[in-house]
Image: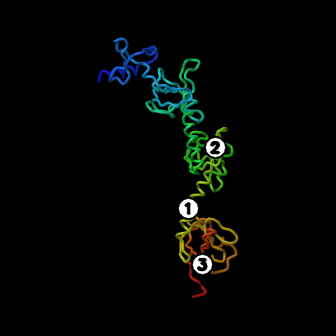
Amino acid sequence: MAWLFSFWHHLRTVTTTETTLQPAPEGVPVEGSNGLLINVDGRIVPNYAATIVSFEEGDVVNGKVVRIDRDEVLLDIGYKSEGVIPAGELSIRKNVDTSEEVELGEEIDALVVTKEDSEGRLILSKKRARFEKAWRKIETAAENGDPVEGNVIEVVKGGLILDLGIRGFLPASLVDIRRVHNLDEFMSTTLECKVIELNRSRNNVVLSRRAVLEEERKEVRDQILDRLQPGEVVEGKISNIVDFGAFVDLEGIDGLIHISELSWSHVNHPSEVVAIGDTVKIKVLDIDRDRQRISLGLKQTQEDPWQR
């Protein structure tokens, strides 16, 4: 079979500039050639038709990157000539650098835009092939309530643009649980978000990272509430101070030290006793699991001066 391998290697490396492909003659396939050779009137000739893939415009094909230029990429898909992917068809990102999007020898999927343009070229699109696949994935995630993951590629007025294979919009108000003052810090990061709005006819995908964070926070809260017991002494950090008391971050859920539980002495304002960022030891006084509220006491971890 060495002769067959040698013939196949030669056949795959012949370009259209070297050979003009003729219509396949009618003949009988030669046994053992896998259809690459046919017998026509007693002569063994190449079956060129067997080496050319069949596809239509709109089909997604797979091929190997054989050349990378500044404005286009050539892809070998087993057709009579290489397919051309213009730089603008590589990615949904703006100002695409072709050498950063693909590598020589890399196998990628591409959608057939046109089999023959005005210059006789086969035009392909990597981003449109990814677009179709991404839509199916996003629609499934939206139906099941699953999160999707994407890289932040732009900061725009009112939010962020994520690369999901298609452009997804993440409003600034839904980037985090708390208000974000500098959206630029999220550039080039990968975020996990829920799909909250989907309109394929308008290519519109709206995302919420806040929904994912709130679900995670709820799970953490439930775990902490299950673990804590009244009477237990724990450690936390003062996260906020208000007129009626101080809130303590217990690694995912806030508990309240009422102003009356801060000190055995009279306190006019909680800031007289604690400051934001202080690490404190507190006693769990009560837990309302239904309302997810934890009452804490600071003075209970200190000696009662009235009992000396």
Would you place residue 151 above or below residue 39 in this image? below
Give the alpha-carbon distance from disc 3 to disc 2, as whole Å.
Answer: 51 Å
> Which mark lies nearer to you, 3 or 2?
2
Q: Quadrant of residue 296?
A: bottom right
Q: Is mark 3 on a helix, strand or loop?
A: helix
Which comes before the other along the chain, label 1 or label 2?
2
Colouring used for the render: rainbow
Question: Is residue 162 shown left or right of residue 107?
Answer: right
Query: In the drawing, what numbered circle is on residue 205?
Result: 2
Residue count near mark 1 (Cα–Cα under 10 Å), binned few <14, some 14–19, many ≥20: few
Tell me residue 243's x, y (percent): 70, 70
Q: Which of 141 and 291 is in front in this view?
A: 141
User: Dividing the image into 4 quarters, which one contains the N terminus?
Assistant: top left
Question: Is residue 301 shown left or right of residue 78?
Answer: right
Query: In the drawing, what numbered circle is on residue 209?
Result: none
- Residue type of the residue flagged with mark 1: Glu
Q: What element carries label 1?
A: helix
Residue count near mark 3 (Cα–Cα under 10 Å), binned few <14, some 14–19, many ≥20: some
- Residues at discs 1 and 2 in contact (Cβ within 8 Å): no
Would you place residue 186 above or below residue 290 in this image? above
> Which mark lies nearer to you, 3 or 1?
1
Tell me residue 117's x, y (percent): 58, 20
Total marks placed: 3
Q: Mark 1 points at which residue?
A: 219
Q: Mark 3 points at which residue?
A: 299
Tell me residue 191's x, y (percent): 56, 48
- Residue at the spot 45% in from the left edge and 23% down from the top edge: 52
- Residue type of the residue flagged with mark 3: Lys
Tell me residue 131's x, y (percent): 57, 37
Give the alpha-carbon distance from disc 1 to disc 2, as whole Å.
Answer: 27 Å
